[in-house]
Amino acid sequence: MGALFKLRPSPPRWPAALRAALSMGLPVAAGWLAGDVPAGMLATIGAFTALYATDRPYQNRAAVVAWIAVAFSLVVSLGAWAQAEPWLVVPLVVMLSIAATFICNAFRIGPPGAYMFVLACAAGTALPAPHIAVWQIGLLVLAGGALSWILHMAGALFSPRGPEKAAVANAAKAVALFAEATGTAGQDNARHGAAFALHEAWAVLVSLQPPKPRPNGALARLRDLNRELHLLFATCINAAAQPREKLDAVAGRAREIGAAARSLRADRERTEPPQVPLGRPGLKGLLRENLNLRSPAMRSALRVGLAVAVSGVVGAAFSLEHAYWVMASAVLMLHQGLDWVRTLQRGLERMTGTLVGLCLAAAILTLHPTGLWLVATMMLLQYTIEVTVTRNYALAVVFITAIALLIASGGRPMADDSHLLWARGIDTLVGCLIALIVHALTAPRSPAASLRQEIAETLKVLQDVLRHIATGQVTTPAARRARSTLQHEVFVLVTSTETEMGGLSRQQDAAEDLWPTVVATQRLAYRTLAACWAIEQAAEQGKAGKPPLAQPELAATTDALAQLRTAVLSGRGPLTFNALPDFLSGEIQNVGKSLVAPTA
């Protein structure tokens, strides 16, 4: 309950909020000037394009946002086409919800994810604009998306490398916090936060760049700075016996790098750093990883599809006038793949915000703003949504509810405002309840099985990295792929742990039993990755020595890891090892000692 009244810290969002507000207001203004406000309100559906890809580099953003604008146009057109054939509505929205949820989660499209596409399609099945043909509806939505694209790209005129600078500055802050937390109770969380920020920065600097980016001194310099941050990160991991003064110096240097990234001039020439990590997996890798029934993306997609199907049937059975609100509410609850606790929290926030939002919507609909007052109202609501959504979701829902009802009215006076408000409240409640029931019924029947699998997979990938360490060749393409995969597996492991910890009681109990093993596995993985960075740095400085793990010692280490994998999957433990090479001996022993048999 406390989260309902708490404002969480958040980076400044006024630029994104202003862009979203303009994207929402300008189509309405154009419709008013043309004498067709409903057409302008239709175009605002395409304006939701402005909510996506806000942290991507501009060249990548241009393509992604363009595809999103086209997708909005297509899904609304499909919804409008299905309006004439009511029996098509539920199957269409179900299929779209499954596809959108899978694509957005598997390919990491980012917030607001699949929800807006499903909402747009579902809204298209009940548009209050019968005088507009389907093809015209598609063009209007596309026009709204095109306007959002222009506003999205306007920032490139002022700071072409703004997203890259922000990513490196964020990584620098996270590394500084990790250095300050090293040796304290908060070091594990700080280490994960720094690793994730560095990984995201490499994604922006490498994965989301063209295969052969144009020569640019700023990009090269930012890659160089981020690489130095990664070396500082490795220093912190290896800093168990180092004095506090050295860690403070690392934190200070990380903050200097952050300041340098923020103030970097676009024309400053620098050569590329000698080695650049691979960043996040590519599209093929992500598809291969998620195209199976055990993947979080696939599970979320199927869960959403089931909830939408049930919502559609319930809406038809009870003749709900705005049944698409039921389906949209169910998608909103489930499309992110949140655990049970956070899904329940999201439902509570949604219902509380909706109830208050209905009061705000009633006031707005009673006043019935027209012309420029309508434009100003739409812009103010959208701006407020964007500046509050990351700080307090329940508060943002108040304004989301108001703007949704304003769009649903088509800008025209409603004969019975109270009926519309009542329908919104009931439909939201029904959708949230259906989502919670589906979530509970589709919870894993084997507690922590997926978590054990993720621990075992992390240990398997770690074996591959150790083989490269034993050769001393950690910068070959194969070695870099192995290092990138290991880092990715650590992130997946942490996400799986958070999901299990927030599950039903049996999942929570099983996850708590495995929590020490998760932490020990993380430490082992990060110690291994830090060794790779140390070898790489020594080679560049001409100080390359023998690898920390020699070939004769590799067999003993990989055999120990294989035993750990078997024990994790079979639920045995604890394990101890009598003789291990010095390198990683303590970390491997800690993983073995952390294992416990599952509780009954």
Image (cartoon, rainbow, N blue to C red):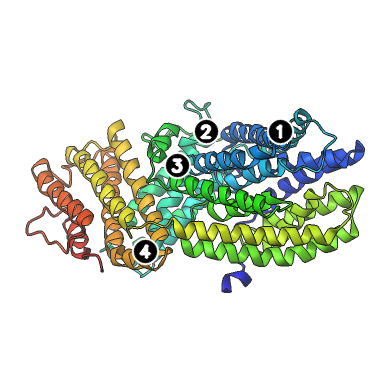
Under tag 4, what secondary structure?
A: helix
Amino acid type, callout 4? Gln
Q: For marks 2 and 3, give the CA distance.
A: 17 Å
Residue 157 in which image quadrant: top right
Given contact means CB atoms under 8 Å apart, are the residues at marks 1 and 3 in contact? no
Which of discs 1 and 4 lies nearer the camera? The answer is 1
Q: For marks 2 and 4, give the CA distance.
A: 50 Å
Q: Vertically, is 132 above or below 297?
A: above
Q: Position of residue 449 (x, y in %)?
A: 30, 55
Q: For marks 4 and 3, give the CA distance.
A: 34 Å
Could one spot residue 222 in this view of the protein?
no
Badge number at residue 507: 4
Q: For marks 1 and 4, give the CA distance.
A: 44 Å
Badge 4 density bin: few <14, some 14–19, many ≥20, Cα 10 Å? many
Location of mark 2 (residue): 217
Under tag 3, what secondary structure?
A: helix
Q: Residue at x 42, y 63 (%)?
A: 503
Amino acid type, callout 1? Trp
Which of discs 2 and 4 lies nearer the camera? The answer is 4
Q: Position of residue 269 (x, y in %)?
A: 52, 33
Residue 9 in which image quadrant: bottom right
Q: Position of residue 490 (x, y in %)?
A: 34, 51
Q: Residue at x 36, y 66 (%)?
A: 506
Location of mark 3 (residue): 202
Location of mark 1 (residue): 81
Badge 3 density bin: few <14, some 14–19, many ≥20, Cα 10 Å? many
